[in-house]
Amino acid sequence: MSILKKGLTGAPVKRLQEKLGIGADGIFGPGTEQAVRDFQQSAGLGVDGIAGPDTFSALGLHELVLLRQGSRGAAVKKLQEGLGIGADGVFGPGTAAAVAKFQQENSLDADGMAGPETLAKMSGFTEITAETVQKAAVQPDEAHFESEPLPEISGSDVVAGNAVEVPEEKSVWGKVKGWFS
């Protein structure tokens, strides 16, 4: 699932911390987890201390939304409705295939994952604009995160498989997407 949780580091974590108004060191530790919990409770979201698509959307961090197999919630349901497929809020293989088809039809990288560039082309995601897609680019003050190693993915995570090498990306989610390839 495309999430930020305790133990992760990088530019997306730094952006989350800045939006939460806490120390922005790019390290998702206990303080960040508690701040996410507090925000989730105040926003009427499920409280788990893990920042995912619905938390990002509620925070206005649309540039961090990445929907992929394993994702669940309102953002996935909205995606499915936009694709004209069964909208159960669970991103499974059928949703991935529909996303890849949409991407191919819209001259996008057909990877079956819906990030800002894909969502900006969908009519139901009016909050995700060309400006949002630009915000998804790594900013100069975030470049130092690119040299950090990827965290290990344990068997307890939703994602199956091993992390893979990914070509250099210009998006803050570029590295994260590689964990799920």
Image: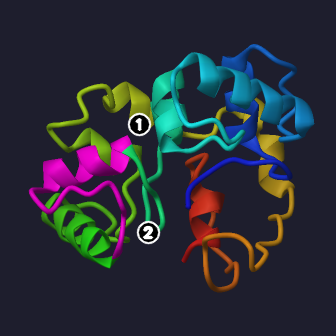
Taking 29 as reference, is 76 left or right? Answer: left
Q: Is residue 99 above or below residue 41?
A: below
| The stretch drawn in magenta includes residue 75 | yes
Query: Dot 1: few (<14), some (14–19), or many (≥20) neighbours within 10 Å?
Result: some
Q: Earlier in the sequence, mark 2 or mark 1?
A: 2
Name the spot of residue 40 as percent of width and height, x first: 61, 27
C-alpha gap between disc 2 and disc 1: 21 Å
Taking 168 as reference, is 43 left or right? Answer: left
Q: Is residue 75 above or below residue 56?
A: below
Name the spot of residue 134 as percent of width and height, x first: 45, 33
The residue positioned 77% from the left and 45% from the top of the image is 10
Q: Which residue is mark 2?
A: 69
Element marked by disc 1: helix
Q: Which residue is mark 1?
A: 133
| The stretch drawn in magenta includes residue 173 | no
Q: Amino acid at mark 2?
A: Gln
Element marked by disc 2: loop
**Residue 33 sits in quarter:** top right
Taking 180 as reference, is 4 left or right? Answer: right
Name the spot of residue 89 as percent of width and height, x first: 32, 54
Q: Are marks 2 and 1 in contact (CB under 8 Å)?
A: no
Magenta stretch bounds: 74-92
Classify the position of the N terminus by image quarter: bottom right
The residue positioned 34% from the left and 69% from the top of the image is 112
